[in-house]
Every structure is written in C-alpha cells, then in structure tokens.
Amino acid sequence: KTAFEKSIDPASQTLLQKAENEGIETAWDRYEQQLPQCSFGQLGVCCRNCNMGPCRIDPFGEGTEKGVCGATADIIVARNLLRMIAAGAAAHSDHARDAVLTFKKMSEGEAGSYKIKDEAKLFSLASEYGIPAEGKSREEVAVELANAMLLEFGKQNGPVLCTKRAPGVRLRLWSELGIEPRGIDREIVECMHRTHIGVDNNATHILLQGLRTGISDGWGGSMIATDVQDILFGTPEPKKSTVNLGVLSLEKVNLIVHGHEPILSEMIVEAAENPELLELAKEKGASGINVVGICCTGNETLMRHGTPIAGNFLQQELAVITGAVEAMVVDVQCIMPSLGGLTGCYHTKFISTSPKADFPGTVRMEFHEEKAYETAKEIVRAAVENFPNRNREKVSIPEEKQECMAGFSVEAILNALGGSPDPLIEAIAGGAVKGIGAVVGCNNVKVQHNYGHVNLVKELIKNNVLVVTTGCNAIACAEAGLLVPEAAVLAGEGLKGICEALGIPPVLHMGSCVDISRILVLASAIANRMGVDISDLPAAGAAPEWMSEKAVSIGVYVVSSGIYTVLGTIPPVLGSQEVTALLTKGLDSVVGASFAVEPDPFKAAKMMLEHIDKKRKALGL
Ligand code: BF8
C-alpha cells in the first residue's frame, strides 16, 4: 500500500513516505507481513483454554465440529468474547483503581504533588456515596470517599453504586435480567472462572455475564476513573488547542506523553513549566519545552490544560519518525512495543514509567505518587538533556496542525445549554437536531487511518446529528477540523443554527475512553428529563476503526445501556451463528439495543440515521 492508501491524513502520509525512504518499519508493514491472517482466529473458533488443545472448529462444517472437551463453535466463540470483555473491563477498572489510590494517598497527605482541584465535585460525590460532610475537613471527606470507591471494586454484592445514575427503568431491566453488576473485580474474576475448561458452556449464559461485566466497566470502573480524575485534576471546561504531528516543534524540546493515566501526564505538564528546567532547555540550545500528547493521556491533558495532541493510536510511530522527539514517555495501554526498536533508530529516549508496564528498549523511570513531581522533573530533565543529540538531518516535522476545541464534560455541556438539558431536548423535539451520535474508539490498520472516523462523523453532522466523541475518534475529528465552531458550516441547517447560537462545534470532544462514562451520564440526564429509557432516545453509537479489548467492553456496556452500536471492523465471532445472531439481533429484545457491523462509514451513517429516525417516530417526534 502507498502512504496515501494507508492514511487520509496528509501529515501521516508525509511521515509514512519518510519511513519508507529511511527503510523504517511501521504497523502497516507488519500487518502486511501477517497477511493472510489466521481465519480460525478471525472467526473466533480457536480455543487455547486448556492443554488438551489448542483446538479449532471447522467453520464450514466439513471437519471437526467439537474441541477435545466437546466444546462447540458457539461455546468457544462465546468464551473467547467473554475473555476479551474481561480484559477490556480490567484495563479501564485497574486504571480507575490506581487513580483512586492516588486520591487516597493525596487525602492522607502522602502524595503532596496532588491537590483537590474540584471541591464541588468532591462534595457532590461524597453525598452520592452517602458520606456525611458536616463538621469534616475536605481531606477527611476525601479519605472516606476514596475508601468507599475502593469498596466498589471488591464488594461481593451489588449493585455497583454508580449504576443508580441510569434511568430507573434501565436499572430494573438489569436487575430482572440478573446482569446488575456486583463488585467490579468480582465480575472480571467470574469471567475468567466461567471460561476455564468445564465451567460455563452455554453461549447465551456466557454472554449475559459479558453484559454484566461490561456494565461494571462503563457504570463502574470507567465512571469512577472519570469522577476521581475530575476531583484531582479539575472537571474539563471548553478550551482551544492544536492537534496533529505539526504540533511538534523545531526549536523546542519535544516530550510526548503517551498512554492513559493523567496521574503521570498531569505532573509532566507541571514539571515542564519549572523555571530551572526551562533555563536548562535554553542552555541546551532549545527555546522551550513542548509537551504534547498521544492517545488518551493526550486527551486527558488536552481536556484539562489545552495541551496539544500529536496524534492518535496509529500516529505513535510516526511521531518518532519525525526525528524531533526527545522523549516518548509512556505509562499503560495502547503503547506499541515496536517503539523500543524504533526509538533506537533516532535519538528519542523511550521512557516507561508504570510499575505494571515495561517495553523493550526503554529507560525505566518508575513513577510513584509519593514523589510524583520529583520523578516528573527527572523525566523532563532527561528529555531536555537529550535535545543536543537531535540529528537535524533526520528531522522532518509535517506542517499540518489544526485548531480544535475540547473540554466538553457533562457539566460543561449543561453549562453551555444554560444549566439543563432542556434546550437540547427542545432542539431534538423540534427537529433542528435529529439525534445524538456517539462515535468513539481506536485506529486499526485494517481501515485506512482516520477514514472511517472522519467520514462517518461528517455524514452524521451533515444530517443534523450532534456528535459526541472520545478517544482516538476525537483526535481524528480534531485533525480533520471538525472540533472547531467553524465546522458548523459542514452541519445540516438545524444543527448549524444550534452550534452558531451556542458557539460550539458540531462534534463535542468529551475526553478519553474512560470518559465514555460521561456519555452515559449525559444520555441518562436526557432520558430522565424526558421520562424515558436510554433505549428510547434518538441516539446511536459507532466505533468505526476499533481494535482493542477495551473497545469490546465499551461496545458491550453501550449496547447494554440501550444504545444501538455500529462496529466498523468485524469482531472475531462469525464462527458462531448463535453468538452472531445474539449480538446483532437477539440483544434487541433483551436490552433494547444490538450491534451491527458495517465497514463502509457512509453505509454505517445511514444505518445510524435510520435507527435515529425509528426512535424519533416511536417518541412521536
Ligand atoms: O483508550 S481509542 S486505541 S488510545 S483503546 Fe487505545 Fe482505542 Fe485509542 Fe485510548 Ni481507547
């Protein structure tokens, strides 16, 4: 494939060309080397859950129909899917746990680098968790809240507390179905138990546990991560910034924060303003220190500080290939191990910071809350000291950088609407806004980079669907210029009018992937105000280029919450007719929503629009 076929983004195309000229391998090359990919794996019919296997089922019914233990394709596919959901839910929830532990240490005075930034949110959450605040210092309230949040992970009997933010009808439905999540960790552990040889061997029964685990992520782990991060780092408000690889600087020290946990990146952003380090940067011949983000940690710092973003998932290697990055600083999730070898081809220092995650070729600078700011300073210092090693002949920074507006927390959206969702509901009822599209998720080399994201979102806004976005979709939309108020010209007349009146973009950046919890809260606020269930709303979701296990868990909780969701890449389930039928049809009669798969973003948009129309009709709109 040519650079143009690999990505729709001109900055990425330039660097893909540079990679080719320099003989540097990227994810796209490794994908081509993998082709043809294993069709048993693609269909989900390979089982490695015990050592009598590996077993695989012939999907055409001509060869083996059962694994050694007797498991059929339906059982194997369902079990594999459940393990994907468990891994995704674990990733989000373990991130949340660490954020709460930092919050707890801060409250107990053991992590002095962190402060309470949103006191109002602290007290409103304390009241939600049933913690009386009278006569207590805010630190005392914070310790009690942290302990209560930690209990959500290990408790044995549900429901997970934040599920009560969902409309009452939805809660009752979950309870009747027996999929109300108990403790967050409990659901994940039970997935692993059920998929051990000889435990749960009924595809439908297995999938119900998948729904329960997904809900424990969206309304549990992810929601707790968002809440606690807002207390610690501030609830986002709209702010402007810039995105794409052109945010890297020729004159400044470039430090990229990549991964997911703002616990690290917040400190790096602060340390990069340290006068002593700025002076050092000057001594080393740089005009300053340029901190930029990649992936969701980039979204976190963009949302709260307006820190520029260099790119989304498939741009992580390209950023290094500019030859202008002094340090690639990573924590957890979505970090390619290829960065080790790649940074070795340039002067870039690859710094891993999480006690949980190491990669080949890194300098380890483990990050602990107790001395967070000191470690962050050391990391920034390492980047600054590396500046003189930059090889000017190898440097090529694309020109492209695009303005964007981010920071649309639920609080910020309600603020923009004058304090309640009513104006939005009126706009929906009046038809100016047809509905809401939640478009999220990763990049995937199987899709031309950003093609699915940008085209799907453009189609939706053109048809008056207000889009809310997070994760790598948000970055793709930002790069395509959709996250500025001026993008209203690309929207249909009704949506355009609303955006112009409020001064907002037609695509609202709500944060990182754990912040999809914000979308759930917004959907609940609208549904509650309208007196309906989430599944009645004229809303639809999509993940046009998804690839990670986290995305599987997200898809599951979004559908379980009642939102029809279109996937742009095919999940490994087609080897089982039963599982495929359940996901694409059966779920509708269970949770009032289902999945669809459509790789063509124009067709996917059409499907979402038809769904929104159907829901409008049912509401009498
Ligand atoms: O959590 S969208 S590639 S960066 S998994 Fe990863 Fe996917 Fe990007 Fe954020 Ni989400």
Image (cartoon, rainbow, N blue to C red):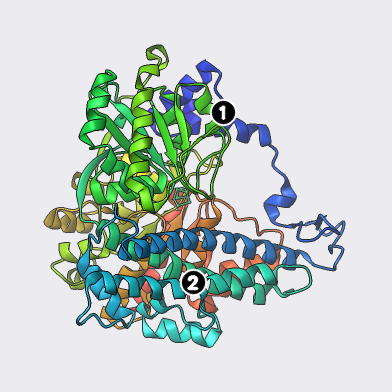
Residue 61 locus on image (x, y percent): 83, 60
If the image is split into quadrants, where does the N terminus sit?
top right
Quarter residue 53 falls in: bottom right
Quarter residue 454 falls in: top left
Q: Is residue 428 shown to the viewer in this render?
A: no
Q: Residue at x 56, y 18 (%)?
A: 23
Q: Is residue 114 left or right of residue 329?
A: left
| Mark in the foreground, 1 or 2 | 2
Classify 10 Å Cα crowding around label 1: few (below 14), some (14-19), many (20 and above): some
Q: Is residue 408 shown to the viewer in this render?
A: yes
Is residue 86 or residue 7 the one in the foreground?
86
Residue 79 locus on image (x, y percent): 69, 65
Residue 408 locus on image (x, y percent): 25, 57
* Amino acid type, residue under disc 2 in the picture: Phe
Q: In this picture, is 586 found above or below 272?
A: below
Residue 245 locus on image (x, y percent): 35, 31
**Real-space CA distance between mark 1 and mark 2, rounded to the nearest whole angstrom:** 37 Å
Q: How many marks?
A: 2
Q: Is residue 441 left or right of residue 253?
A: right
Q: Is residue 203 left or right of residue 145?
A: right
The residue pinned by badge 2 equals: 153
The residue pinned by badge 1 equals: 341
